[in-house]
Amino acid sequence: MAAAGHQPSARDRMEFALMGNEKMAAFFESWAAMGWAMVRIQQQLWMSMFGLAMSPLSRHGAHRAAMDVLGSGLAPVRRRAVANAKRLARIKF
């Protein structure tokens, strides 16, 4: 954005719009992925409480579950960032 200066070209403006749209899409994908990860963890917790699973979530298991939720949330952001870096590397400025 800084390279575009205070008079961005039409191509720069299109890139800025694309970046904004991609950030919004990645945000919503992240929230959805984190929500589904929480659903899976809650199911595991309920199963462990009713004796349907082998072992309940221990402290280590809870930490791993939290990391799974965060990892699920960051996966869409990382995927888009890598794709953007590859795409922008091909553009000649």
Image (cartoon, rainbow, N blue to C red):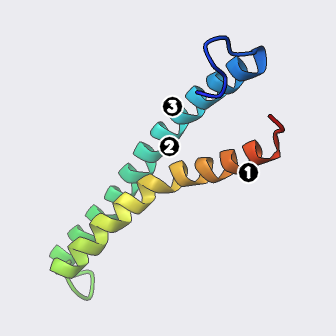
Dot 3 or dot 2, earlier in sequence: 3
Q: Position of residue 17 (x, y in %)?
A: 63, 22
Is there CB contact under 8 Å for labels 3 and 1? no
Asked if residue 49 is positioned above or below residue 5 in the image, the reply reads below
Name the residue: 27% across, 82% down: 53
Q: Residue furthest bottom?
A: 54
What residue is disc 3 on?
24
Asked if residue 43 is positioned above or below residue 13 in the image, the reply reads below
SS label for mark 1: helix
Asked if residue 45 is positioned above or below residue 21 in the image, the reply reads below
Dot 2 or dot 1, earlier in sequence: 2
What residue is disc 1 on?
86
What residue is disc 2 on?
29
Amino acid type shown at disc 1: Lys
Q: Nearer the viewer, residue 91 or 45?
A: 91
Image quarter where the N terminus lies is top right
As measured in the structure, the alpha-carbon distance from the residue carrying label 3 to the one carrying label 2 is: 9 Å
Dot 3 or dot 1, earlier in sequence: 3
Name the residue: 73% across, 51% down: 86
Q: Position of residue 33 (x, y in %)?
A: 45, 51
As measured in the structure, the alpha-carbon distance from the residue carrying label 3 to the one carrying label 1 is: 20 Å
Image quarter where the C terminus lies is top right
As measured in the structure, the alpha-carbon distance from the residue carrying label 2 to the one carrying label 1 is: 20 Å
Q: Residue furthest top?
A: 7
Mark 3 or 1: in front is 1
Name the residue: 21% across, 81% down: 60
Amino acid type shown at disc 3: Met
Answer left or right for 19 relative to 44.
right
SS label for mark 2: helix
Camera sees residue 50: no
Amino acid type shown at disc 2: Glu
Camera sees residue 62: yes
